[in-house]
Amino acid sequence: MRAINRLLNLTARLFAAREMGILLVLIVMCLVLSFTTEGFAQVENLLLVARQFSMFATMGVGMTMVIVTGGIDLSVGSVLALAGCAAAKCMLWLGPYAGGEIAAVAGILAGLGAGLVCGVASGLIVAAVRIPPFIVTLGMMSITRGLVYVITRGWPITGLPPAFFFLGQGRLWIVPVPVVSMFIVAAVGAVFLSRTRVGRSIYAVGGNEEASRLSGINVGYVKFFVYSTCGLLAGLAGVTTASHLSSAQPSSGLTNELDVIAAVIVGGTSLMGGSGTVLGTLIGAALMGVLRNGLVLLGVSANWQLIPIGIVIVVAVIFDQFRQMRRGRVQA
Amino acid sequence: MKKTLGVLSLLAASVAVLSVTGCWKPSETKQVFALVPKSVGHIYWAAAEKGMHAAAQEEGVEGLFMGPETIDVARQITIMEGLIAKRVAGIAIAPNDPTAVVPVINRAVSAGIPVVTFDSDAPESQRLAYVGTVNTAAGKLAGETLAKLINGKGTVAISTGGLGALNLNERVAGFRGAIKAYPAIKEVDIQTNNDDEELATAVAESVLARFPDLTAFFGANAPGAPGAARAAKQSGKVGKLKIVGFDDTPICLQFIKDGVVDATVAQRPYDMGYRCIKILVQARKGVKPESQIIDTGVTVITAATVDQFLGKQDYTP
């Protein structure tokens, strides 16, 4: 009985929090689509939609941390592509020497490593030098995309070992593997941000950097940490995408950074820093994914689609801000 | 406690409604056939869209134009998955990558949705047919046209689109095959313009800066030749730099009329869109297409013939 009470309390706390507004928007959208289209409310479609936004949500976890510190990471889309290429090249190189499974694991580690290296580089520069993260990650975006073109010469990298495809194309029971990994990453991220000292210092740095520095928080380390994590998660998204497409595409991740940032902001994270949750980002990513799926199901011509996407982003944020103001919360 | 119960019951109600409405099927008035280009925003695809709508109107069905914002493979697959969920009557797709789309095309076919490819093929998939230009032959034609223009001697640079696209690579291969017969012609560079007009111009300008004595430019996709034309005008090379391109976009034709571009190999995207719908409608009735490769043909347009085509193509959306 006490366990049930605690579960209910946890639920209440979660849902009474800032995410309720955006969750309501998502629920309404799903209901509307269920009534107006016959394809939306099918299990297979919903599972695929979840897979479609899973990588945006995964990168969103890292992006949430970065934005909470008051920064931003524009390089995630390009790091995604670079990680895919690194994984592919590693697997092709190992191919003749090792079995499929070993090559696949090595490739995944190589891709994660590539993402981590990019994140670490961004993190070091942001932490050590007083250049705005916008500029640093803009430069990183260009460098990594350039590396992708150099490595691939524009061609997709194919001929990857089939053992690798499970990560992006496999299912655990009926659930696509990327959806499972998204939930794992989100859970770890959420617990980390709310329960650990480093996690809480991320909020402190974003809320008031000078005050947190004076109270003994190693601001430089916190910033270094969030960008490294963001890079690592972009690396995970990169290898998952390459696995899904059975190839490393040089055009992968193009404009993805905008979708990830949109998911994070729609999810209630403030661009000023200091507040935001992983759950909110998850809902934000789901909202964008459902919206795109809805536009296809409703037969909205491709030429028109970007407009409702932009409108929904603005409306969702306005609705959420309105809710925050009514509850008397301070705008962080 | 009341708040929690309220929230939980709202969630439960939503789930219940969702599952119930999943069984509700509104009556479909017309069959919907979808056309999925490589990306939206270029008038080449607008022509295909127009052809699609014309055929759809004749057949009494509905045509749906649905493509990704950029030549992104993953986004194109996402759209295909949405169309399968929508249970459209047929799909025509111009794949950004010939192998990455194979699983989703096969899924559509298994779900009873006939699929054809157009403009660029995915030969390993279960697509019913490919409707478009036979690209190797078209590239060869472009190569021969260019070789004659430069009298079999000089340096050539190529501007192409998404490097993973099968159709463009076939064109480039055909082109290279043709100029191989001329040992005095040397290919010095190949660059991608990502199917984007702005990038095509920037890329051509960089190539000209690197090879100021370049003899000729081959644009393997629609933005290629106009990009080279703008670069040639910028550096005063009009007349000295020979340009052969692809597709008869109004911009390209105007450049031909102005003497900046020398020739273009015009495809027939309107025909592609038109014939795709016709084939899909027939496939829906159980009639297979007459062959797996349906060649929509090309026309070489030069300054001599450009007036017949200027202002007459189906590019007005």
Image (spheres, coloured by chain):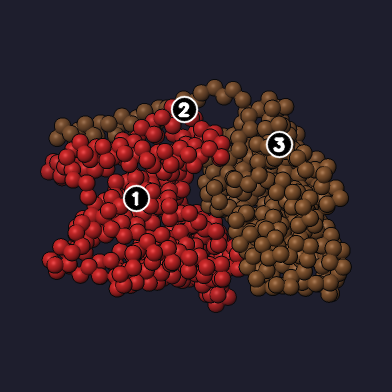
Chain colours: A red, B brown
Q: In this rendering, is residue A21 above or below B58?
A: below
Q: Position of residue A10 (x, y in %)?
A: 19, 45
The residue where tag 1 is placed is: A264
Q: Dividing the picture into quarters, in which one does residue B278 lie? A: top right
The residue where tag 2 is placed is: A36
Res. A200 visible in picture: no
Q: Nearer the viewer, mark 2 or mark 1?
A: 1
Q: Position of residue A165 (x, y in %)?
A: 51, 59
Image mark 1: chain: A
Amino acid type, label 3: Gly
Amino acid type, label 2: Thr
Q: Position of residue B121 (x, y in %)?
A: 69, 51
Residues B17 and A249: in front is A249
Q: Are marks 3 and 2 on the same chain?
A: no
The residue where tag 3 is placed is: B51
Image mark 3: chain: B
Quarter holding the C terminus of chain B is top right
